[in-house]
Amino acid sequence: QQQVKQSPQSLIVQKGGIPIINCAYENTAFDYFPWYQQFPGKGPALLIAIRPDVSEKKEGRFTISFNKSAKQFSLHIMDSQPGDSATYFCAATSGSRLTFGEGTQLTVNP
Amino acid sequence: GAGVSQSPRYKVAKRGQDVALRCDPISGHVSLFWYQQALGQGPEFLTYFQNEAQLDKSGLPSDRFFAERPEGSVSTLKIQRTQQEDSAVYLCASSATVGYGYTFGSGTRLTVV
């Protein structure tokens, strides 16, 4: 059962563009929403995370927007670079369990 | 250590063989998790330990899967009588606090032939 739905499945942007990845959830028990970046052959690495009492969080070029009433959140990558090409996963935590979205494969062309 | 270490990095098993996958978490991390990642998918929760206690094993797909962490540090995921559908990357993660700040290892890619 997919509790966190992520879109799009893949995304191609030019260098300097602002890719946006969207996620939606149903379980109101989720209380922590991290984003992970994964390169081929590596495990997911934590990028940025937000709690539901905050509507936006920015760390460097990465921004999370959170809409609690709509149960949606999104990742924006400012001034994207070819080195940002990776698979991005949204996730949500309830208690000890981390539930992942299906992933977005981002390609940033030079 | 500096990160979560998993071994082996790659494992090829013949169908029906038993396999054991090892995870060395970050020193001092009390929480340890196993996830299964199928090709092109997000990781799926398998099981969770707090110290040596296995507090949640509801994600284990069958009774062929077994995990242990006897001394509260190193953990082993064992799969008995492997099947082709077990082919996946098995990821281990650890954290100092429950629910936050997971650090993942690079995983073990299991291929069952």
Image (cartoon, helix red, strand yellow):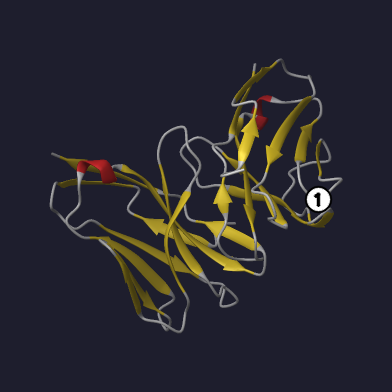
Q: Secondary structure at mark 1?
A: loop
A79 in relation to B34, above or below:
below
Amino acid on which the number 1 mark rests in the picture: Gly
Mark 1 — residue?
A: B72
**Residue at 16%, 56% in the rendered image:** A79
**Residue at 51%, 42% in the rendered image:** A43
Q: Nearer the viewer, residue A52 or B27?
A: B27
Q: Nearer the viewer, residue A8 or B47?
A: B47
Left or right: A80, with B21 as reference point: left
Task: Tell me the quadrant of the picture where the C terminus of chain A can be found.
Answer: top left
Q: Chain of mark 1?
A: B
* Residue B53: quarter of image: bottom right
* Residue A19: quarter of image: bottom left
Q: Nearer the viewer, residue B18 or B104?
A: B104
**Residue at 73%, 43% in the rendered image:** B61
Residue A76 appears at what percent x and percent y? 27, 62
Residue A101 appears at what percent x and percent y? 48, 55
Residue B28 appears at what percent x and percent y? 70, 55
Residue B89 appears at what percent x and percent y? 58, 34
**Residue at 60%, 76% in the rendered image:** A29
Q: Residues within 10 Å of mark 1 (few under 14, many from 20)?
A: some
